[in-house]
Image (tube, rainbow, N blue to C red):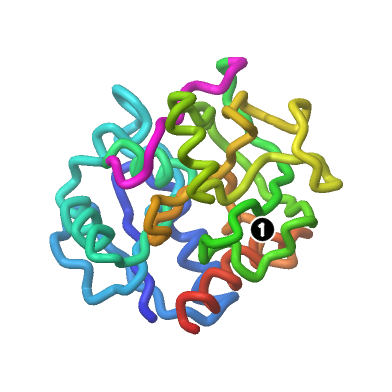
């Protein structure tokens, strides 16, 4: 299983996810440039966090048209795995690989802090193996992280078990007070209907190294790796 991490102009978490996967979890990782048209036989593509193209127009709106995204879309449509974190999530929504959109935070301020999320989906690979009753402390760092879609599409997400994570309190209880950005139904992460494309706003790669005092993100990434290899 080979992971490919895409670097766009303005990405700033590409090395973080590369380090987390390769140095802490022993995965094979290669770096992919946004102008590449070859995924180098990678099985799992990761779109990292950052501010691709300076977030001009909308976050992820320009990166969606980078040459490599044609290959990423083809890879996903063939059943290949794709995972977007923060800006990567925004790019996946702009590319229509995931439904909905990410709007400005409800208070129109950039938020950088630890939050708690709880796994939700019973069928998505990224959640399979995680304790659905235990909160995970995962950092967020975004100005446009408020997940939004129509009421009909939110209903469809729930019916299809596509909500992967929701913001919660430290006890794993989903409450309005635990919602940092105004996302509908406290949604912090989702997947597509075929459950091979995943996106989340919190940064699990920032909670992997014990020197940072938090390894909850390691649980998410290690679980993801073990499930795709199994």
Q: Residue at x 52, y 61 (%)?
A: 124
Image quadrant where one finds the N terminus: bottom left
Q: Where are the magenta residues, as a range?
A: 96-107
| Residue 204 falls left or right of residue 34 | right
Residue, x 37% and y 44% (percent of image)?
98
Main SS of the magenta part reads loop
Is label 1 in a helix, a strand or a loop?
A: loop
Q: Quadrant of residue 40?
A: bottom left
Residue shown at the point (69%, 30%) measured from the top left: 179
Figure disc tally: 1
Q: Describe residue 37's horizontal placement relative to residue 162 as left or right.
A: left
Residue 200 seen in this snapshot: no
Would you say residue 61 is visible in this rendering? yes
Q: Residue at x 40, y 46 (%)?
A: 88
- Up/down of 56 relative to 215, above or below: above
Location of mark 1 (residue) = 207
Q: Is residue 34 magenta?
A: no
How many other residues sit within 10 Å of disc 1, few (<14), some (14-19) or many (≥20)? many
Q: Is residue 103 one of those drawn in magenta?
A: yes
Q: Give percent across and percent down for residue 108.
A: 56, 16
Q: Where does the image place residue 15, in percent across and percent down from the top left? A: 45, 60
**Extreme residue in the front direction:** 159
Q: Where residue 217 sits: x, y (%)? A: 65, 60
* Front-most of residues 63 and 132: 132
Relative height, residue 225 to residue 193 (above, below): below
Left or right of residue 81, residue 16 in this image? right
Of all residues shown, which one is farthest toward the right? 171
Image location of residue 63, percent across then percent down? 26, 40
Quarter location, residue 201: top right
Compared to 223, does 150 lie above or below?
A: above
């Amino acid at each position: 299983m080979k992971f490919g991490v895409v670097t766009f102009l303005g990405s700033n978490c590409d090395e973080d996810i590369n380090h987390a996967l390769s140095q802490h979890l022993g995965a094979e990782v290669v770096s992919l440039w946004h102008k590449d048209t070859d995924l180098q036989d990678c099985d799992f593509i990761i779109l990292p966090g950052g501010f691709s193209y300076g977030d001009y127009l909308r976050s992820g709106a320009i990166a969606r048209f980078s040459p490599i995204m044609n290959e990423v879309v083809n890879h996903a449509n063939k059943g290949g795995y794709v995972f977007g974190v923060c800006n990567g999530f925004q790019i996946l929504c702009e590319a229509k690989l995931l439904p909905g959109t990410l709007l400005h935070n409800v208070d129109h301020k950039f938020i950088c802090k630890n939050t708690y999320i709880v796994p939700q989906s019973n069928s998505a690979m990224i959640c399979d193996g995680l304790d659905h009753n235990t909160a995970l402390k995962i950092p967020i760092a975004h100005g446009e992280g408020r997940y939004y879609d129509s009421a009909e599409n939110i209903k469809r997400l729930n019916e299809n078990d596509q909500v992967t994570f929701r913001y919660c309190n430290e006890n794993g209880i989903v409450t309005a007070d635990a919602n940092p950005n105004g996302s509908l139904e406290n949604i912090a992460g989702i997947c597509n209907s075929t459950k091979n494309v995943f996106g989340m706003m919190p940064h699990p790669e920032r909670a992997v190294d014990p020197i940072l005092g938090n390894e909850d993100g390691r649980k998410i990434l290690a679980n993801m790796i073990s499930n795709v290899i199994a």
